[in-house]
Amino acid sequence: MTDADRRAMLNAIGVADVEELFADIPAEIRLRRPLNIPEGMAEAELRRHMAELAGRNADAGRYACFLGAGAYDHLIPAAVSQLVSRNEFYTSYTPYQAEITQGVLQATYEYQTLVAELTGMELANASMYDGATAMAEACLVACAHTGRDRVVVPRAAHPEYRQVSATYLRHQGLEIVEVPFRDGVTPVDEVRARVDGRTAAVVVQQPNFFGCLEDAEAMAEVAQEHGALLIAVITDPLSLGLLQPPGAYGAHMAVGEGQPWGSPLSFGGPYLGFFAAQGKLVRRIPGRIAGATVDRDGNRGYVLTLQTREQHIRRERATSNICTNQALNALAAAVYLTLLGKEGVREVAGQCVQKAHYLQRAMTALEGVSAAFPGPFFHEFVVRLSADPEEVTRRLLDYQILGGLPLGRFYPELADCLLVCVTEARTREEMDRFVTALGGLA
């Protein structure tokens, strides 16, 4: 832009100079130097520059990923991306004129149905951001439904989920009461000691952050004894191919991360939170619910049955300000689950369990590596290393292995521990290569 262009623009809006334009901004917070960015480039020059930057990236396809902790590297059928890339889907956003977009509403309805069936709940919504915000919203629902102000949350639940929930609740005068873990799981007696007449809900993550299996039924009983709700949190819902669904052990809400249902890791997003609940909570849950109906001629159609956002209803009746529509990820989840079917989901879950236990046995046979916790696990487990886990994972990169999560980042008492994840995507050659490399580092 030339100086003449700038003057013309300033004249058009009726100000003398840029200083007058920004007069409302306090002088002490204005930047008084040029931005630290390079000069602009010609298109051809910029293409060469971007190609050079891209060339510095590692080939992700050559790395074996043993990271989990809430984001999982599952195999995704090629048909998923082909179907969700159709024009009518990947341009979809919040359905303000909902009934016009019958295809989007049907896709949402099918997604909700699949989530409800997998979790064993009576209904499911759409439009949650991710698993962490879904848990936070569930805590708010529990407090509003019961009129109580405390939520009991195990320390073995995902630490980032706990942080997000604490942020949501803190500014509404609500409290989170944490429960310590023992041998990688949450002791029921510790839960019972913290649940009282002020407890709105008890949270249980199944499997928990360490991959261990909790006594969810016992926690449900404790919650029921005190009139509290049970919130089941699931960071990898493919585990439901083998594990008992939350509805079967008395959960009032089942929430978690839908990324494993057909969405790639993508450096952390976009992801998809799922939220399922018992029918009695339908008017308290956030997001929106698509429903099926018939028109006056008897033809099947789809409608936006419920939306509890303040933009759509009176502010005092709104339950949440959730607004961004995660329809594309929900569609990917519906396509993925439909392609796999019941047997496919069960097969994926079975492979995860078998491969994880194979790797855990091989790793703990090494000198300097031991199992941190004794109980059963799904597809994540914790090992204790004689070497520094941070240094070990850094050095494993030289072997093109993403070796897991050093737990000291979240749990100081587990600074010598590594959280390892195995999905059906890992091959025996990759697992054996991991063990061989670890043998020289641990």
Image: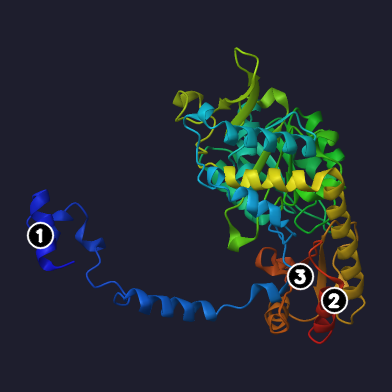
Task: Give the percent coordinates (x, y) of residue 433.
Answer: 82, 80
Q: Residue at x 47, y 32 (%)?
A: 96
Viewport quadrant of the N terminus: bottom left
Viewport quadrant of the C terminus: bottom right
Q: Earlier in the sequence, mark 2 or mark 1?
A: 1
Question: Image check: 270 left or right of 227?
Answer: left
Task: Give the percent coordinates (x, y) of residue 407.
Answer: 71, 67
Q: Earlier in the sequence, mark 3 or mark 2?
A: 3
Asked which secondary structure carries label 1, the reply is loop
Task: Name the image quarter holding residue 330.
Answer: top right
Q: Amino acid at mark 2?
A: Glu
Q: Earlier in the sequence, mark 3 or mark 1?
A: 1
- Residue 105 in view (yes/no): yes
Residue 429: mark in rendering: 2
Question: Image check: 210 left or right of 163?
Answer: right
Task: For label 2, count other residues whose C-alpha is less than 10 Å away and answer few (under 14), some (14-19) or many (20+).
Answer: few
Check disc 1 and report the residue beneath it. Answer: 17
